Amino acid sequence: MNPRAARLPSLLLALLVSLPALAAEPPLSATELVRRIDKRMSLQSDYKGTVRILERRKNGVENAYEIVVYRRDSTRDLLFMTTKPKILNGSGYLRIGKNLWEYDPTVGQWTRTTVRANISGTFTCEADFDRSRLSEDYDAKDEGEETIDGTKYRKIFLSLKPGVEQPFPLLRIWVDSDLNIVKRVGYAPSGRTLRSDYIRSYQRLKDPVSGEIVYHYKEVLEVEEEEGTQMLLKYDEVVLQPLSPNMFTKSFLEQRAR
């Protein structure tokens, strides 16, 4: 008898005994989960894209906006400017350090604003155009699983860390098995719901610097709870390539507005 053949059943038995232990690997902690979400949505390359917004107000009025976004995640540089509607063309925002500045081309004036400011008359905010910073800005608490339409999602409750500014002091996110956020709800400190976002789809991008696949929003429906206004955001025309350092300056936006 072949000695190797004699040992084969025992090897298979050992493998089968070990399988339950492998399957019992504990789920990611809430902190690690949001850290991985941030990582898979962060770029080493520079970023340019166009965000198209269709706003539907409760009274039936519709408005369309286009905002061009420039990002450099490695240095937290961020600039975005409105190109539509025509009345807002040339207006924009520039982040310098921790300060966000708003530019009004009609008077050629810059005004310091905050991350909680509504952008270009919509209820979007700086975070809608920036990279994901959940693990940096919030403390995460696991709220277990919730099954919706037969699919299980992890629920994570996020509380803003001391000294950090964000539009929503409290957040709750629903995350699928692929670490995609499918829903997020922002709350006031009192717990009152401010905005609910439904991430309808993502786009897969290959970062030319890191060579890694990065996940970026494709279509997001945002609902402002108090007034019932809805906005559909489409993240289009994404280009990952080096941007000039001069782009993240006040003079760049001023020249584009002329």
Image (cartoon, rainbow, N blue to C red):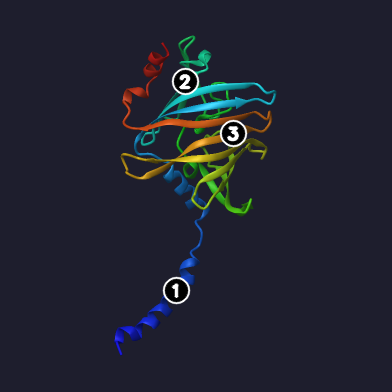
Pinpoint residue 215: horizontal percent, then vertical percent. Answer: 44, 42
Residue at image point 63% right, 38% down = 189
Front-most of 178 and 136?
Answer: 178
Identify the amino acid type marked 1: Ser
Name the residue carrying label 1: 18
Contact check, label 2 and label 1, Cβ < 8 Å: no
Q: What residue is rendered at 58% in x and 39% in y?
A: 198
Q: Kindly report the distance in space between the C-alpha atoms of the residues bearing marks 3 and 2.
A: 21 Å
Q: Which residue is drawn at 53% across and 29% down?
A: 125
Q: Where is residue 140 in the image (x, y as percent from the top left)?
A: 54, 48
Hey, which quadrant is residue 150 in on the image?
Answer: bottom right
In the image, what residue type sits under mark 3? Glu
Residue found farthest to the front: 1
Q: Is residue 143 visible?
A: no
Say which quadrant the N terminus sits in.
bottom left
Identify the residue under disc 3. 222
- As shown in the figure, which amino acid type bears the numbered disc 2? Gly
Label 2 sits on residue: 92
Q: How crowded is mark 3: few (under 14 residues within 10 Å), some or many (20 or more)?
A: many
Q: Whole-percent x and y of residue 98?
A: 45, 30
Whole-number angstrom distance, CA of label 2 to CA of label 1:
58 Å
Q: Which residue lies furthest to the bottom in this view?
A: 1
Label 1 CA crowd tier, 10 Å (few <14, some 14–19, many 20+): few
Image quarter for residue 74?
A: top left
Give how far apart the Cα atoms at labels 3 and 1 are.
Answer: 46 Å
* C-beta proximity under 8 Å, tags 3 and 1: no
Where residue 70 appears, as percent x and y from the top left, is: 40, 28
Relative to 131, residue 156 above or below: below
Numbered badge on residue 139: none
